[in-house]
Amino acid sequence: GQNIDQPTEMTATEGAIVQINCTYQTSGFNGLFWYQQHAGEAPTFLSYNVLDGLEEKGRFSSFLSRSKGYSYLLLKELQMKDSASYLCAVIDSNYQLIWGAGTKLIIKP
Amino acid sequence: DAEITQSPRHKITETGRQVTLACHQTWNHNNMFWYRQDLGHGLRLIHYSYGVHDTNKGEVSDGYSVSRSNTEDLPLTLESAASSQTSVYFCASTGTSDYNEQFFGPGTRLTVL
């Protein structure tokens, strides 16, 4: 079967750095997304990786290793507004999106 | 501005009733999707459409149906609502950017009593 694993919950301190990991086992791979979802709201697009390496976008970076079936989202200079769930999703060989259950990130002052 | 809307935002219904959730997008996207989101699960695909008159079953399609008569709308119908269908439902559409990322509607919280 297809599976995406993320930690259920993480806690970090305002101003710090946090890394959210995602491992996947899917039938094929055509790209990986990270989305942010605030409580009670819709997911919003953060990043996309299809080649190995690091993609940087301001305070957020996303890394991919296709050989290891692994990605991480790195959030720097954490702000209280970064408290949200972070969803990892993989495009499989049928171009279907397979979603992880999400990681709830709690930011403490 | 182009957008994707869902209605109603909240709905309470009774077991056995037929319910239709609306989804409307003004981006002129061909691809549209319906998901449900439950605690402890990722977004699970119910149905999707790649264009007018095209519909496909997703991972959890039992008890749901969709129809696509125009580009803008993809209504989701629960034929006979069950308590197991209590969930938050998201509609999404895919653009034609380099990423083909999905844009989500605000969601509909459905409670089946």
Image: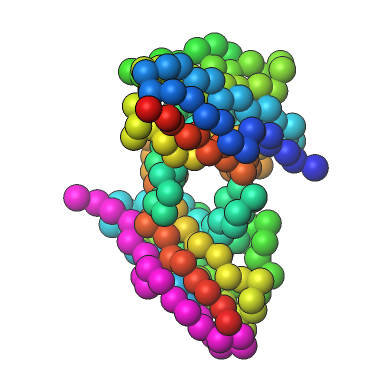
Q: Quadrant of the C terminus of chain B?
A: bottom right
Q: Is residue B25 left or right of residue A23?
A: left
Number of dots carrying numbers: 0
Say whether residue A81 is left or right of residue B36. Answer: left
Magenta residue check for A30: no
Residue at image location 57% in from the left, 40% down from the top:
A102
- Residue shown at 73% from the left, 38% from the top: A3
The foreground one among A41 and B100 is: A41
Place residue B10 in its image quadrant.
bottom left
Q: Is residue B45 left or right of residue B93?
A: right
Vertical order, A80 against B67 (above or below): above
Give the magenta range.
B1-19
- Image coordinates of residue A1 in percent, x first then y, are 80, 42
At x 41% / y 54%, what residue is drawn?
Answer: A40
Which quadrant of the figure has residue A91? top right
Residue B27 picture location, percent across and down: 30, 52
Q: In the image shown, does B32 or A109 lie closer to the viewer?
A: A109
Color scheme of the displayed model: rainbow
Task: Give residue A9's position: percent from left, percent from top.
Answer: 58, 36
* Foreground residue among A96 and B19: B19
Residue A28 visible somewhere in the drawing: no
Q: Residue furthest left?
A: B1
- Residue B31 position, x and y percent, is 46, 52
Q: Nearer the viewer, residue A90 or B73?
A: A90
Residue appearing at x 61%, y 25% in the figure: A21
